[in-house]
Structures are given as structure tokens and as C-alpha cells.
Amino acid sequence: MSSTLIVLNLKTYLEGTGEGAVKVAQACKEVADDSGIEIGVAPQFCDIYRVASQVDLPVYAQSLDPVGAGSFTGHAFVQSIKDAGAVGTLINHSECRLTLANIDASITTARNAALKTIVCTNNVATSAAAAALGPDYVAVEPPELIGSGIPVSKADPGVVTGSVDAVKRINPAVQVLCGAGISKGEDLAAALELGSVGVLLASGIVKAADPKAALEDLVSKV
Ligand code: G3P
């Protein structure tokens, strides 16, 4: 396995919901096995168990709530996420933003449960702030490029290199992913060139007519 990491966020796309999540995860697994590149998926909470129990690949929650066991209603409890089969979680996605205090508490909650943490950020300053909290990964994604089909690695390389530099300065143990508009092999290659260790992506694969072919293209230039 290379050290490159690809995480596919299934969001609430219909194509990545229920049995669709299993199908997309299966495609990820096949391409990961063929390419030697680690590919994880982040399905909706209700699909974590379905995916993790049917497909042997790393499954991430799309977020979690920093609540403990007990009198809490309507929350995503870390133990439930872990027992469902997740190995990690996204935190603070632009579509699910948290306060700084909640990001910190979510990282601590996940870490205490031995879940990997990917904190999403929207610019260099928030990447630096997130790095100070010590997650496993910071994933920088300019919100205006999310779902646009315009790859961050080409449209805004500075936010990637700036995040890589800032994170390295603040906490060298934290690795940087980038995302937004990534779908092609050249986008991933450019992201790696810029110093990130991989990508967090969604629509370009989940909504592709043939997700497996799209994934094969994604890894073709690494
Ligand atoms: O979490 C991944 C993300 O927000 C990027 O989405 O559709 O631009 O690949 P997309």
C-alpha cells in the first residue's frame, strides 16, 4: 500500500445511500486492491454498519457528536459509530460546521475511542487552527469549489500549499488532504505534487455514471 489516502464522502447523495452505499464502497474496494492505494468511504450514519459489514475497506462517519453514554437524545454517539464498524470520522465539514470548542471535543472523543480524525477546513487559517488541535488529518476544501467540478488542486493551489506549510509548522504529525472538485487522475496527481497526502472527494465519483471507472481514472496517475 502507498501512503496516499483517498476518502470518498457519500454525503446524502441518493447514489450513495442504502444499497447504493454498498455498491460504491465495493467499487472503492476493488480499485484499492488493484491499485494498492488506500480508499475509504464516509457513508451516512445509518449506512455505516451496512457498508462495514459487507465491504472490507475503511469506513468513516461523516461527523460525530462529543456526547458520552447516557441521557442524550438525537446524537451520533462515538461508541455506536465504532461498533457499527467505522475506523474514523470526518469532523467540521463545510456542510456540517462546528464551533472550535466542538471540533476540539470531537477530536478528543474520537481519539479516546481510537477512531481516526479528519478535520475539514475551508482556508489556510482554519487549517492552521485545526492542526493545533492534533487530528490525524486536516482536509482543506474551499467551500466555493465543493461540488463544482473545478479541482482545488488547479483552481486554488495556494490554499493547499499554504495549508501544508501552516500545518507542518504547527504540528508536523498532522497530515494534509485536500478536496473540492477533485475527480480525475490529474487532479489527484496535482494534489500530491502540492504536498498533500491524498484527497477527500464526493460528487465526481458518487454521481459518475460508472463510479468504478471514475475511480480507476482517479488513481491512474499516481
Ligand atoms: O467532502 C468532500 C467534498 O466536500 C468535496 O466534494 O463533490 O467537490 O468532490 P466534491
Image (tube, rainbow, N blue to C red):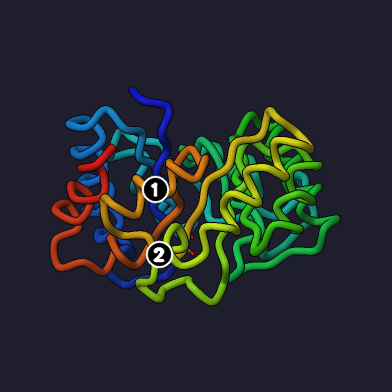
Q: Circle 2 sits in a helix, a strand or a loop, which is it?
A: loop
* Residue at the (80%, 56%) spot, across then down: 102
Q: Is residue 93 visible?
A: yes
Amino acid carrying label 2: it is Pro
Rendered-image quadrant of the N terminus:
top left
Q: Circle 1 sits in a helix, a strand or a loop, which is it?
A: strand
Instruction: Name the image quarter holding residue 19.
Output: bottom left
Rendered-image quadrant of the C terminus:
top left
Is disc 2 in contact with disc 1, using a CB cutoff of under 8 Å? no
For disc 1, the neighbor class at 10 Å (few under 14, some 14 to 19, many from 20) is: many
Instruction: Name the image quarter holding residue 206.
Output: bottom left
- Residue 180: assigned label: none
Q: Quadrant of ligand 1?
A: bottom left
* Residue at the (48%, 37%) spot, across then down: 197
Q: Count of labels shown?
A: 2
Residue named by callout 1: 41
Residue 99 position in % (x across, y down)? 80, 63
Residue 113 position in % (x across, y down)? 67, 32
Q: Is residue 67 visible?
A: no
Task: Pick out the residue farthest to the top.
Answer: 1
17 relative to 218, above or below: below
* Residue at the (55%, 61%) spot, across then down: 141
For disc 2, the neighbor class at 10 Å (few under 14, some 14 to 19, many from 20) is: many
Q: How many angstroms separate mark 2 from mark 1 (CA)? A: 20 Å
- Residue 151: assigned label: 2
Query: Is 57 on the left or on the right of 23, as rendered?
Result: right
Could you say which is closer to the camera, residue 108 or residue 35? Answer: 35
192 relative to 47, above or below: above
* Residue at the (66%, 34%) spot, across then down: 174
Task: Pick out the residue farthest to the right.
Answer: 101
34 relative to 209, above or below: above
